[in-house]
Image (cartoon, helix red, strand yellow):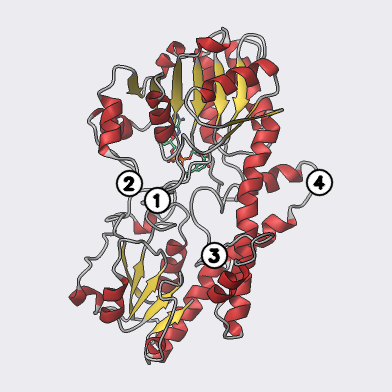
């Protein structure tokens, strides 16, 4: 197979990462086949219905009505593609160690169908060495073929940022690494067909490590501003004003914003993939652990502030009705994985509060790997008579679609973890509490 031969792509895992990737390759004119074990996603695509907020029905229909696109749960069709991209989950297990089961299962299935000349690229976030050690050995053992001669592997980290208005899958530069020159050439030529900027690096391990560095950088810097927030709060200094002042420095400073704790499938999880692998080399990742500790303690700060706010109202948490505003892990998305809202809800409920939530993008809490205790709970309606009835409202996610002026008029006690109300009058301060 020469570089020009890659004409079709198989993408495994059609979630937040895989679905936009499938769309981007299809838009570039390639033939695409999407694979998922979740039949409901395949049915949704085939019937032209989206299941991700920022991915429209129109885009889905482009896929479902195209002769160049098929989606399936039948992995036999892997034989029909030149290249296979893996976009399955890489969470942490109950001991907060890498859960590689999705990657392993997927790679085993690919191994069963592997064809000579195929290129397999892992996109899931993972520890350095996954591609060259785990992927390679499973594929070789299952297929009897030789990596670097009969088939090729590469790693290309996904940098998808759902809800980002400035960048999308096509415009975000894509790092691509492979330990063989042929693997790298094939992978680079594949991505160059669909994406604006491809950044080749010398090995899969460099590409795997670069992705972890990006997310560790965010985790550590968020922890730093979160720690600053605790100190500034005790000193009665507005942390947001401090950050905005520091951000006027045109070099050597990058703005990070404190919040109620980390959420999402990436930042709270990915750094610990390196922590786990570093142990094999007898090394501790102290920055990562410390950032995890500081960020992990933020929901507790919000709970304490909620208790103090209720105290100001002459109320206890026990038997108070508390509304959690926003359960998505960040504004304007419908993704609630690892959201700090659930930690806050669990703790306040344990303290005896009655908990409801409002989220314009998550009307009902779906089934997920975590938070099964909240599954099926329905968002309250956004109505004065309903919102007024709560003893406290905790803003955890600052969705744009919420009318915060209405909230201020309707609610008696608001705990603001996102600086929604940046300037408070004396009267405001009697009912709005920064956390
Ligand atoms: N969501 C993001 O914004 C984002 C950003 C950068 C990187 N990543 C990384 O990308 C990877 C995928 O994340 P995601 O957010 O798309 O996850 P997701 O849960 O939204 O999607 C994963 C999909 O894989 C499917 N799947 C699971 N096991 C499978 C199997 N054995 N065979 C086929 N399909 C299978 C699931 O049904 C699901 O549709 C993770 O490693 C994540 O860390 C995610």
Residue 283: image location, x then y, percent? 79, 48
Element on which disc 1 rests: loop
Please say if the residues under marks 2 and 4 sit with CB atoms less than 8 Å apart.
no
Q: Which residue is mark 2?
A: 53
Residue sitting at 46 percent across and 36 percent down? 169
Q: Which residue is mark 3?
A: 257
| Upstream in sequence: badge 2 or badge 4 | 2
How far is disc 4 from disc 1 in space, using C-alphas? 36 Å
How far is disc 4 from disc 3 in space, using C-alphas? 34 Å
- In the image, taking residue 387 as reference, residue 172 lies left or right, namely right
| Upstream in sequence: badge 1 or badge 3 | 3
Element on which disc 4 rests: loop
Q: Which residue is mark 1?
A: 335
Please tell me whether mark 4 or mark 3 is closer to you in this view.
Answer: 3
Image: 71 above or below 367: above
Q: Local crowd at mark 1 within 10 Å, few (<14), some, or many (≥20)? A: many
* Residue 282 badge: 4
């Amino acid at each position: 197979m020469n570089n020009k031969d890659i004409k079709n792509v198989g993408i495994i895992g059609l979630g937040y990462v895989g679905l936009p990737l499938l769309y981007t390759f299809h838009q570039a004119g390639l033939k695409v086949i999407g694979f998922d074990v979740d039949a409901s996603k395949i049915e949704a695509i085939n019937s032209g219905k989206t299941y991700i907020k920022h991915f429209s029905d129109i885009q889905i229909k482009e896929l479902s009505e195209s002769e160049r696109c098929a989606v399936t749960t039948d992995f036999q069709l892997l034989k029909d593609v030149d290249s296979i991209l893996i976009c399955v989950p890489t969470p942490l297990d109950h001991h907060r160690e890498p859960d590689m089961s999705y990657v392993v299962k997927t790679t085993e299935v690919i191994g069963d169908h592997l064809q000579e000349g195929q290129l397999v690229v892992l996109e899931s976030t993972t520890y350095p060495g996954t591609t060259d050690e785990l992927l390679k050995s499973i594929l070789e053992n299952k297929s009897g073929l030789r990596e670097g001669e009969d088939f090729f592997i590469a790693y290309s980290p996904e940098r998808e940022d759902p809800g980002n208005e400035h960048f999308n899958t096509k415009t975000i530069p894509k790092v691509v690494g492979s330990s063989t020159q042929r693997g790298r050439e094939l992978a680079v030529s594949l991505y160059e067909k669909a994406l604006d900027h491809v950044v080749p690096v010398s090995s899969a391990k460099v590409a795997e490590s670069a992705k972890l560095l990006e997310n560790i950088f965010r985790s550590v810097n968020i922890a730093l501003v979160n720690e600053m927030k605790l100190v500034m709060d005790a000193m009665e200094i507005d942390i947001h004003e401090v950050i905005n002042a520091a951000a006027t420095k045109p070099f050597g400073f990058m703005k990070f914003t404190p919040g109620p704790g980390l959420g999402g499938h990436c930042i709270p999880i990915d750094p610990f993939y390196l922590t786990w692998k570093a142990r094999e080399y007898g090394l501790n990742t102290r920055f990562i652990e410390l950032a995890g500790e500081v960020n992990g303690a933020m929901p507790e700060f919000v709970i304490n502030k909620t208790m103090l706010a209720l105290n100001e109202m002459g109320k206890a948490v026990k038997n108070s009705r508390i509304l959690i505003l926003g359960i998505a892990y960040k504004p304007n998305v419908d993704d609630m994985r690892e959201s700090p809202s659930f930690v806050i809800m669990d703790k306040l409920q344990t303290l005896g509060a009655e908990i409801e939530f409002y989220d314009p993008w998550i009307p009902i809490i779906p089934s997920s790997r975590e938070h099964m205790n909240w599954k099926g709970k329905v968002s309250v309606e956004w109505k004065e008579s309903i919102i007024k009835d709560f003893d406290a409202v905790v803003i955890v996610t600052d969705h744009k679609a919420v009318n915060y002026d209405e909230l201020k008029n309707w609610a008696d006690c608001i705990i603001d973890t996102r600086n929604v109300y940046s300037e408070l009058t004396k009267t405001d301060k009697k009912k709005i509490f920064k956390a």
